[in-house]
């Protein structure tokens, strides 16, 4: 499997984990140590942990087969996906400066991965 596809799968799982954590914490915000155990046992929090675990196994696979200097920059696409899903799903603000920054991230990752 091509390194880009493996890293893309890894990134998608990482971002999905962040999204389900955001959903869970939007429903029940962390207000202090007193509600931490209740939050950690929420299904969405647990699902996010599973997604992160699977992403980590995929990352181990990628590290064992490809050059770190080529695959690690590709993970910066997670910032792009995270920002886009924050905007699309959670109606977060998205400025021109953020768009420009994300474009620079993508361009830099592309140059580093070549």
Image (spheres, grey):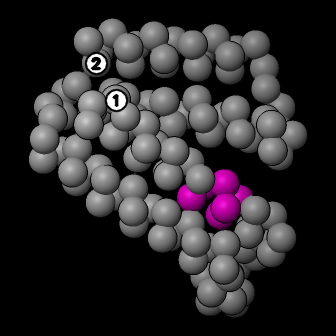
Magenta residues span: 17-22
The label shown at residue 57 is: none
The secondary structure that most of the magenta stretch takes on is helix
- Asked whether the beta carbons under mark 2 and mark 1 sit within 8 Å of each other, the answer is yes
Sort mark 2 into few (<14), some (14-19) or many (20+) by Cα contacts within 10 Å. some
Relative image position of residue 79 (x, y in whole percent): 54, 34
Secondary structure at numbered mark 2: helix
Q: Nearer the viewer, residue 99 or 35?
A: 99
Residue 91 vertical position relative to residue 39 in the rendered view, above or below:
above
Pointer 1 residue? 4
Q: In the rendered image, which residue does mark 2 sit on?
A: 113
On the question of residue 12 being in view, the answer is yes
**Residue, x 26% and y 12% (percent of image)?**
114
How many numbered discs?
2
| In magenta segment, residue 20 | yes
Judge from the rendering whether residue 26 lies leftward or rightward of residue 19; answer left or right.
right
Residue 24 screen position, x and y as percent: 74, 69
């Amino acid at each position: 499997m091509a390194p880009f596809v493996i890293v893309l799968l890894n990134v998608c799982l990482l971002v999905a984990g962040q999204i389900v954590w955001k959903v869970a914490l939007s429903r029940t915000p962390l207000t202090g140590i007193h509600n931490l155990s209740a939050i950690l046992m929420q299904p969405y929090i647990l699902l996010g942990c599973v997604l992160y675990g699977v992403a980590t196994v995929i990352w181990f696979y990628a590290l064992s087969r490809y050059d770190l200097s080529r695959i690690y920059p590709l993970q910066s696409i997670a910032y792009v996906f995270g920002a886009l899903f924050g905007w699309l799903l959670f109606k977060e603000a998205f400025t021109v400066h953020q768009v420009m920054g994300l474009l620079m991230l993508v361009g830099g990752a592309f140059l580093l991965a070549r």
